[in-house]
Amino acid sequence: MSIKLIVAVTDGDWFETLRRLPDLDEVNFWAPSATSFRALQPGEMFLFKLHSPRNFIVGGGIFAYANALPCSLAWESFKERNGALSAQQMRARIVRYRKADPNDRSDFEIGCRILTQPFFFEEKDWIPVPASWAPTIVTFKTYDTSASEGAALWSAVNDRLSRATAVGLAEAPARYGEPQLVRPRLGQGGFRILVTDAYQRRCAITHERTLPALEAAHIRPYADGGVHEARNGLLLRRDIHSLFDSGYVTVTPELRFEVSRRIREEFENGRHYYALHGESLARPTDPRHVPDRDALRWHNEERFKG
């Protein structure tokens, strides 16, 4: 099987910050501008190199998803996994790269590439860039495992991973063998972004579009056997998310919103929520992201207060 890999130029501070963080399950490789990214499909390998003159590949991950996001949402979703120790530090880097006015308080849109299963090599295992790498490359270059350089890169990465000297992994390094797509395993941040986009940045119940007020809810919580996948998620306004997690509202397997009588009984309130009772859920346009009926049934039976 032939797959693509890319080698992308990374900020040294981003790399140094992340390689020191323990138990990483995902990272956000961001660009300071909201550029689109179509170089890889989910499951292909995304590698990163340092700025010249350190022309070495120093780590990578499995590409999962890409989109443009407000920098505030990127920080809220990934925190230090953005390669910065604070939102202020991340914003300062964005301003520097964009050459923006430091006093500009805009919520800048940035390009985000979500990588799962990230790894960071020890310096003795850094991989020299392929001979075709040009000093003028400032973003990334694509390689294919059907060609000699791409095959050599795939082999070199596997060799380093097999030595178990890559750091930053939430689990033991995996050797991928022959070139293949590797199923990305989303973390909490990637889950939030994927669900937000699946519902076109609108609450699935109220259609609210104020992004800071929206949250990605797990139908079946991760701690109870749920998964970080769009089909196990709903984009909900923050108050409805809280009620959903507490069991005061639910969504039926028929994709109808239901409100528990317990809101009225316990709080003598809830008129706004009862007005939504029976509403149809707004469905994602991608059928793969439509809520899983078994997960909804679990929530109806195990969480909903009736």
Image (cartoon, rainbow, N blue to C red):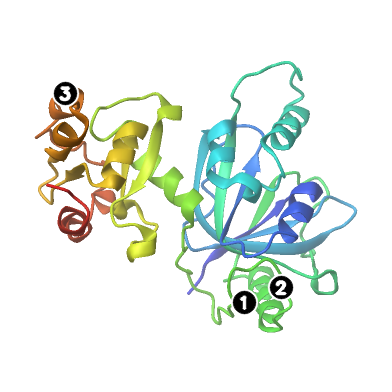
Label 3 environment density (alpha carbons within 10 Å; few <14, some 14–19, many ≥20): few
Q: Quadrant of residue 127?
A: bottom right
Circles 1, 2 touching at the beta carbon (< 8 Å): yes
> Which residue: 67% across, 34% down?
32
For the residues labelled 1 and 2, the Cα–Cα distance comes to 7 Å
Compared across the picture, whether 255 is left or right of 295 comes to left
For the residues labelled 3 and 1, the Cα–Cα distance comes to 53 Å
Compared across the picture, whether 78 is left or right of 157 comes to left
For the residues labelled 3 and 2, the Cα–Cα distance comes to 55 Å
Q: Give the secondary structure at mark 2.
A: loop
Sequence-first tag of 3 and 2: 2
Q: Position of residue 22 (x, y in %)?
A: 67, 63
Residue 214's disc number: none
Q: Quadrant of residue 124?
A: bottom right
Q: Position of residue 57 (x, y in %)?
A: 76, 63
Q: Which residue is mark 2?
A: 166
Q: Which residue is mark 1?
A: 173
Compared across the picture, whether 202 is left or right of 41 comes to left
Q: Give the secondary structure at mark 1.
A: loop
Residue closer to the observer: 7 or 1: 7
Q: Which residue is mark 3?
A: 271
Circles 3, 1 touching at the beta carbon (< 8 Å): no
Residue closer to the observer: 95 or 50: 95
Q: Position of residue 4 (x, y in %)?
A: 56, 62
Q: Label 3 sits on what residue type?
A: Arg
Q: Quadrant of residue 298?
A: bottom left
